[in-house]
Image (cartoon, coloured by chain):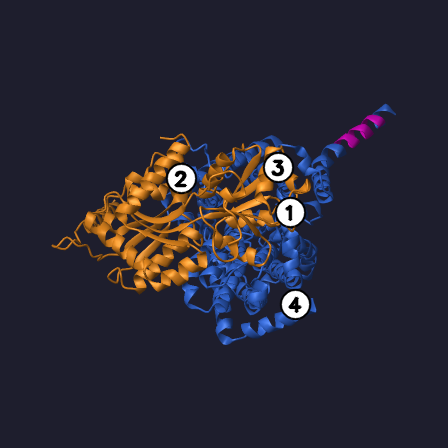
Amino acid sequence: MLENFASLLMGFQVVFDPQNIGACALGAILGLIVGAMPGLGSLAGVALLLPLTYKFNPTTAIIMLGALYYSNMYGGAFSAILLNIPGDSPAITTALDGYPMAKKGRPGQALMAANTASFIGGTIGILILTCTASGLAKLGLNFGYAEMTLVLLIAMTSISWLIGENPTKGVVITLLGILVASIGMDTLSGVPRYNFGSIYLMGGITFTPFIIGAVGFAQVIKLINEREADEEKRKSGTYEAVKLSIRGSMLTLHDFKRILPPVLRSSILGTFVGVLPGSGATTGSMVGYAMQKKFKSEEPMGTGAIEGIAASEAGNNSAAAGAFAPLLALGIPGSGTGAVLLGGLMMWGLNPGPLLFETNPDFCWSLISSLYIANVFTLAVAVLVIPFLIKILSVPIKYMIPIITCVCIVGAYSTSYSMYGVLVMFFSGIVGYLLDKNGFPTAPMLLAFVLAPMLEENMRKAFIASQGSLGIFTDSALKLVLLAIFLVLVLTPSVKALLRKTKHTEKTAV
Amino acid sequence: MKKLLALALALTAVLSLTACGGSGSDIAEDGTFTPTKTVTWVCTSGAGGGSDIFTRKISDIMSAEGLVNGQTIVVSNETDGAGEVGRNKIATLKMNPDYNLLTFNSGDLMPMVTNTQNRSSNFRILAIMAVDKQLLFSCGSTAGKTDYAKAGGDLTDFGAAVEAAKNGTHIVVGGSKGDDIATYDALLEELGLTEEQMSYITYDSTGDAITAALGGNLDFVMSKPAAASQYVESGDLTPVLALSTEHFGGNLADAPTLSEIGDYADVEVPVWRGVAAPAAMSDAAVAFWTEALQKVSETEAWETEYLEPNQLISQYMNSADATAYVSAFEADYLAANGLS
């Protein structure tokens, strides 16, 4: 471990080269911008900038891309909190509490909580990465399909907390999410499903436009309804513009005490989720948020609880750091963005793989140390922009409608550079609005849409390996523990209800 | 109303301008073609993957060597409909057909002919640039979680695994989608095994499959040399079978071919990387592009920056040869899968 810190110091020396510091700062700022724009997630950002970096030396290039990837995770929260449009998929859970909190008149604190949680989560993730990089990656490898299936089942239980007052509606909407997710190519056999003869549907419903539509464009339609009321309010002079300075956005000591425990829990959990092959920041934030549901929050989760924002953002950023462990130690990309970075490594003439730490230690360690620097840079920039961001909230609704619509269209278009994404966005926006209007919560649909394909893939792979036997889920201690957690989560409510009932009957019998 | 009228007028003006820009010939009187506009190159895979690197490398070399008359080549990653939308668009393109190229690999052709009515005859095939082949690897050192590993089977001996499969021990092979599956099917047929005896698990990429193998979830993993090379170097993977009619070089030289393992014929399904164009592309433009691609294949940059790092076999075929080769490949594939 001491050896690791010595190497880290060497890495810092490389990073403090003015050229590298510049690259790091540029990456951090670009990442924040790309992350804040809905639709342009880290994947698109890294992919777009990759060709620019071919002329750099590899270390400078990876420092810039690393910083970009990293600061992206901050940016996603901005539009989620202020506009209820998640900038990228890990920010879905941030929007659940972030937007209500902004509506309650504390947008500055919501943003600050997101930034603080991101910073702490990131720092813990990078620290764990520094100490255990290669060991951690090997641990992740031990998660086979059966283990991943169980982890995903546990993550799926989080949907039940988002279902809301009407369980039937919640179940219907969850199933709808699963159904929509199953459109497209069957990942194992390559056979098209539910494409109704359309070559567009063969690739499935694209993830980002679907989310931008269901959340963002649905929001626009809602705003259209509120427009008149907003105009009235402005005319009659009862409207109070939101004015906030950085000072006014500061968290109170009480706020900080509220977010600290969820941040710490989410950070550690998130790092490990990030290390698992094929998961990444989205799973990190969802698992973090789901876990927070099990702990006490001062306000109920989903109504603007600062704990929810903290749990989601810390999970997201620590998972992003964790995802570097398999990438550097084994040459395995933990996410789509990781895959693009891996492609970059090859273009720069490096051979990613198990030997990278040995053959190019300066490269690996400068990347890790650049993450520390990028984290500090991004925090500074993110805090400084808060007063400007808050201004968005006082823009009259009649201007917001066309602006958000444009942002939605650009975001949906830029995922695959085609109008198909835009169509998906409009359609899911209208459906999302109608569902919301009729009391169907959309969050369970989105979570099911993200998690169901991963669950299906892992479960089917497990069954191929075991030739259909269920035994594969119970043949090791780790699996039994995961299975037990799952069963406890699923059965607790029914057992509780049963106990209450017996108590009740006992009482009436007496 | 006035605003609406102005908008309509502006729209009409813009539309008619773009429509006019579409025509115009760049074919000289002697029948040769020289590009005078920006070239669009469609790649139906995402940025950063193998096809994307192939596409960008060629376009970089073309620009650097001055093969495109100083015009820009824009690479467009069109992944809608698992790539079918982009392929269909190029096949049927009527606007500026001389300025549109498509990266077209065997891994693109197989799902295309399986899932759509689009066929290679709907394109002009410009060239084949390189050919790749696969090997099977095992990760013998780790504690395997598969039936075969638990039964104490020798993972470094593929022949023993085949015998075990015939005697009822379940063998699990993993690999990428597309071309790897075709090679697995060919292997299975030659060995006379069923999918129940030797199953195949499809991964999104070879990298994912290797991850699973390193975690002990697979008995064997199929990969092309490039993706597996580092792991062979570090001792994490051992090559156990060359899916080729001859041995590979370098650190893969030890892997035997199928005919050396038992009484079988060698299995080889070459994976090719090529370039296609719209059916409407003029003959002059086809001649220009096939020649430009030949020049790329002769540069040193192509050799040292693309073929060598990816351990590919250089195999340039001009338009006529490539068309014949792809048609034969497609006919074989259709026949083998009972398609028409």
Placement of A298 over or under A160, stated as above or below? below
Disc 3 crowd rating (10 Å Cα; few below 14, some 14-19, many 20+) is some
Residue at image location 51% in from the left, 44% down from the top: B260
Query: What residue is pinned by disc 1?
Result: A143
Instruction: Give the secondary structure at mark 2.
Output: helix
- Pointer 1 indicates a residue of which chain? A
Residue at image location 20% in from the left, 57% down from the top: B34
Q: Label for residue B164?
A: 3
How far apart marks 4 and 2 lie (CA) works out to: 47 Å
What amino acid type should be assigned to the residue bearing mark 4?
Answer: Asn
Q: Which mark is nearer the camera, 3 or 1?
A: 3
Q: Is residue B242 left or right of residue A275?
A: left
Instruction: Give the secondary structure at mark 4.
Output: helix
Boundaries of the magenta span: A497-506
Figure chain in blue: A
How far apart marks 1 and 2 lie (CA) works out to: 32 Å
Q: Could you say where residue A250 lies in the image, as x and y percent from the top left?
A: 61, 63
Q: Quadrant of residue A8?
A: bottom right
In the image, farthest residue toward the left: B29
Placement of A87 over or under A434, stated as above or below? below
What amino acid type should be assigned to the residue bearing mark 2?
Answer: Met
Is residue B91 shown to the viewer in this render?
A: yes
Mark sitting earlier along the chain (4/1): 4
Mark sitting earlier along the chain (2/3): 2
Figure chain in orange: B
Query: Same chain for marks 4 and 1?
Result: yes
Q: Which mark is nearer the camera, 2 or 3?
A: 3
What amino acid type should be assigned to the residue bearing mark 3?
Answer: Ala
